[in-house]
Every structure is written in structure tokens, then in C-alpha cells.
Image (cartoon, rainbow, N blue to C red):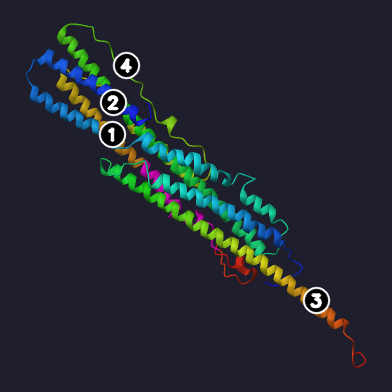
Amino acid sequence: MPETSRYTQDTEAIRDVANSDFAAIADDLAEARRVFIASCIDTAGFFEDPPGPELYSLRCKWAEAGEAIARGMALSVERIEDAAASLRQTADDYDDADDQAAADLDGINGLADAPQSGGGF
Amino acid sequence: MPKDDATFTSDLDAVREKFQEASEKNMREAYGFMLRDQFESQMNRVQSGLRFVNEIGSISGGTAIVTDALELQVLPRLKEYELSNNEGPVQIVRGKLEEWHGPEGSASYQFKWAYLPQLATALENQLAAMQSMAAIMTSYEAVLDQVRQKTLDILKEATKAIDDNTEQVEQASSVAAMVTAVVTGLAGGATVGGPKAPFAAAVFGALGAVGVKLDAVATATEGDNWFDITGDMLEKLQDVATATKEEAGVLASALDEVLNYAAGDFSSEFVPPAVLSTGVSAAAFDGFAG
């Protein structure tokens, strides 16, 4: 992405968000999901063979909803980790662009400082 | 009503024993040793009718494990993701990136104004999902609790009616009246917080109807003799079972609302958007697939 004066970056803050804040959010979701699966789906509170199809259906629906939530949380963790990786890459790209700009500037300054041959323009 | 499974089992055994004693006495006084086969047959039907309460589920060994895990471990961890929380993690991220600016279409613009709001909504909806599941399990626990209470009440009422009938037969009045427990409503036990997210509002709306059928089941039993009284008692126990199955339908409709958000029409609001992380340049958020 070409950088112009319209852009400002704080790559340190971007990396901090990726490495600290997004990591903490992903960790919250992963841990909540782990407890949810272990305590709420696997031991659902419903007997495995309750009397009547209505109660059996309720037990199945609880498990279905629980599994849908767990799937959504797993996907969320994955996407948040992807977003953190993108933020880190974004910060790297900004820094690379700055380094390149500095190198280019050094090159231009070097050209300007070089002794002129041929008696000028 | 004790929620401890062992205490309930003990209470049920005690009430059942009194029912058995009252029944035996009534049969002796009213019928001598006649109709013994019919008596045994009816008692077997009573035992079958009483099995339902133990077959539908446990509280301390079942529902309470789920609600404790949700309320003590899961919900506290996700509580800070409420959108109304101005000091939540997403707001903190926004504050940290105050100095990251760019015009419309830039990575910073996309991240702040397209990605972050959807992330915040998804996180709140995951909190709402857990609140909803906790409320549904709490409601189921209230149903189980009420089935237990109704069963004990029906047994006590039947025992009292049998004792009264025995008194009439004996022309005596020395039997002490049994205490009839006050029927507890479901309303007090079926609420978990008051989430504002549309997700949870739909679930809590469905849960509002839980308990209506079960609360309406009468427990008083009557009849002119032991067979009439126990026949009426069996009908009341069947009413409890029927109402419980109807309550299961109400709880299932609340779970349908959860599924609607977690896997159905609103599932895009349940997970944060995907970000293309090809790792080439700061264009990652330009390719954000919101």
C-alpha cells in the first residue's frame, strides 16, 4: 500500500494490539469454549435415555446448540489469530516501507552530495 | 424443595413409605384381606408412575454442574465483552490505535470502522449465547425441581385422602394431617441476568413461557375409596409427566433461537469476519471479508 502524508502509523501500538490484546481475546474464547465443552456438552445435565421423545429431543437439541456454539467459538479464535497475524504483517510492511523510504532518501542525498563532473547542468 | 438429589430421594422414600402404610391400613380396615390382588396390581401402577421423577434428570448431579460451570467459569470470563462496556477489550484496542490513521479504504480505516465493530458484535453474541444456555439449563432445573415438588405433593395429598377415608371407615379422628408443601413457581428460578443483546432477548422471550403448564397441574387427590383415590393420584402423576413433556417443547424452542444465531440466519453475527492473512503488504485488511 503506497504511503502518503495522509497516513500515520504507530507500528509499536499495532504490534501490541496483535500480541497482547488479540491474544488475550483469543485466549478468553478458547478457555470459555474448553470449559463449555467439558462441563456443559459432555455432561449435559440431561439423562442419556430420558422418558419420551420430547425429552430425548430436548437433550439432542441442547447438544446441537452447544456444538454449534463451540464450532463458532473455534472459528472465532482462528479468525482472531488470523487478524493478529495480519496486524503484525501490517506493522512489518509499514516499517519496511519506512526503511525503504529512508534508504531511497539516503540514495537521493548521496546523489546530491556526489561530486559533479562535466561542469554542472 | 432441596435440589440435592440424595435429599430428594430420601424425602421421596419417606413419603412413599407413609403412603404405603396408609394404604395397607386402609385396605385392612375397609376390605380385610379381600381384593389383595387388585391392591397389589394398583400399587405396581403407582410405583411405575413414581419412576418418571427419577428418570427425567438430576439436579445436584446434573443441571447444577452445567449452571455452575457457566455462571462461575464461563460467564465471568466473557462478561467484559458486553457492547455497553466502555472499558471492554475492543474499546481498549481502539484507544491504543488512536494514532493509526488513514483515509477510507486504507488498512487502518478498514480495521477500525469495518473489522472492529463486527468483532465487538460477535464477542457480545458469544457472551449472549452462554447467558442463553445458562438460562435454558436453569429453567430446566426449575422444571425438574417443580416435578419433584408436584410428585411429593401428590403423594402426600393421596396419603392424606387415604387416611381421611380410613378415618371414616374407623369412625375415628386420631390421624394427624400431613403437611402439604406450598407449590413453588418457576419464575424465581428461571432467570440468569438480563442481557440486552437481541440474541439473548429472543431466547429469554421464549423462556418466558416455561412453567405455565406444570404450575397448572393440580395435586389434590380425591375419591370415595382407596382405589378411586389412587386412580386419581395416577392421573395427577400422568398430568405431571404430560406437562413436563410440554415444558420440554418450550425449552426446545428457546434452543431453536440459540441455533438461529449460532448456526442459522444470524450466524454471520456470531463470529468475527475473516481477514485475508496472505502476509503481503498492509493490504490484509483491505481484503477483509466482512
Chain bearing tag 1 is: B
Q: Is residue B223 above or below residue B113?
A: above
Q: Amino acid at mark 2?
A: Leu
Q: Is residue B258 above or below residue B165?
A: below
Camera-nearest residue between B239 and B169: B169
Q: Residue furthest right?
A: A119
Quadrant in which residue A90 is drawn: bottom right
> Do tag 1 and tag 2 residues touch (Cβ < 8 Å)?
yes
- Which callout, 1 or 4, points at the residue further toward the start of the chain? 1
- Which callout, 1 or 2, points at the residue further toward the start of the chain? 2
Q: Which mark is residue B179?
A: 4
Q: CA distance from mark 1 to mark 2?
A: 10 Å
How crowded is the residue under tag 2: few (<14 C-alpha within 10 Å), some, or many (20+)? Answer: some
Give the residue pinned by disc 2.
B12
Q: Which mark is residue A105?
A: 3
Chain bearing tag 3 is: A
- Which callout, 2 or 4, points at the residue further toward the start of the chain? 2
Q: Amino acid at mark 3?
A: Leu
Say which of marks 1 and 4 sits in front. 1
Quadrant in which residue B12 is drawn: top left
How crowded is the residue under tag 1: few (<14 C-alpha within 10 Å), some, or many (20+)? Answer: some
Q: Residue at x 36, y 44 (%)?
A: B252
Q: Position of residue B249 (x, y in %)?
A: 33, 42
Q: CA distance from mark 2 to mark 3?
A: 88 Å
Q: Does mark 2 fall on the same chain as mark 1?
A: yes
Give the residue pinned by disc 1.
B54
